[in-house]
Amino acid sequence: MNHDPNCIFCKIVAGQIPSRKAFEDDELLVFHDIAPWAPVHVLIIPKAHVATMYEVTQDHAPLLGRMLAMAPKLMREHGVTNGFRTLINTGEDGRQEVQHVHMHVMGGPRPWAKG
Ligand code: AMP
């Protein structure tokens, strides 16, 4: 599996940096954002290192589909029943801070800190 030793999310996948995990399987990890915008704010990431959406090809389509498709179940499990946002930032103009593809899923009662 592709792994970048300098990537903070790869370090989370490897257990070298702690995280509050919400779900894990062979190819995906979900953990709570360290600086949440909303009452519930999780990040869904592929375990394999893919830096940005620019590196994504058709081969990644099933993986990305799984990431999106697990959002509603995750939100329900966290008590989010009145709507949520899904967001993937890409590159500098997309304000991507961590160079490992991740999907934000945010929900819970407003007001939110951001977003
Ligand atoms: P983005 O701007 O889309 O790249 O978002 C990166 C997100 O990763 C931000 O919301 C950060 O709060 C979050 N983040 C950074 N480091 C950690 C960490 N160690 N554990 C959990 N979330 C993190």
Image (spheres, rainbow, N blue to C red):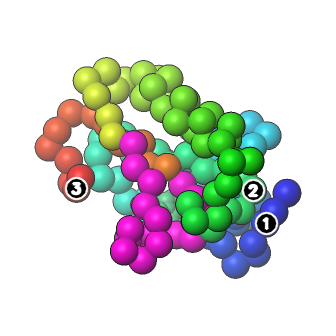
Secondary structure found at label 3? loop
**Residue 92 picture quarter:** bottom left
Residue 71 location, x and y as percent? 48, 32
Instruction: Give me the C-alpha separation between circle 2 and circle 3.
Output: 29 Å
Image mark for residue 48: 2
One can see residue 64 in this view: yes
Q: Which residues are magenta?
A: 86-102
Q: Are marks 1 and 2 in contact (CB under 8 Å)?
A: yes
Residue located at (20% from left, 47% from top): 112
Secondary structure found at label 1? loop
Q: What is the quadrant of the N terminus in the image?
A: bottom right
User: Which residue in the rendered view is the most extreme toward the right?
Assistant: 1
Q: Which residue is mark 1?
A: 3
Q: Earlier in the sequence, mark 1 or mark 2?
A: 1
Amino acid under label 1?
His
Label the magenta part by its dominant secondary structure: loop
Is residue 46 a member of the stretch shown in magenta?
Answer: no
Amino acid under label 3?
Lys
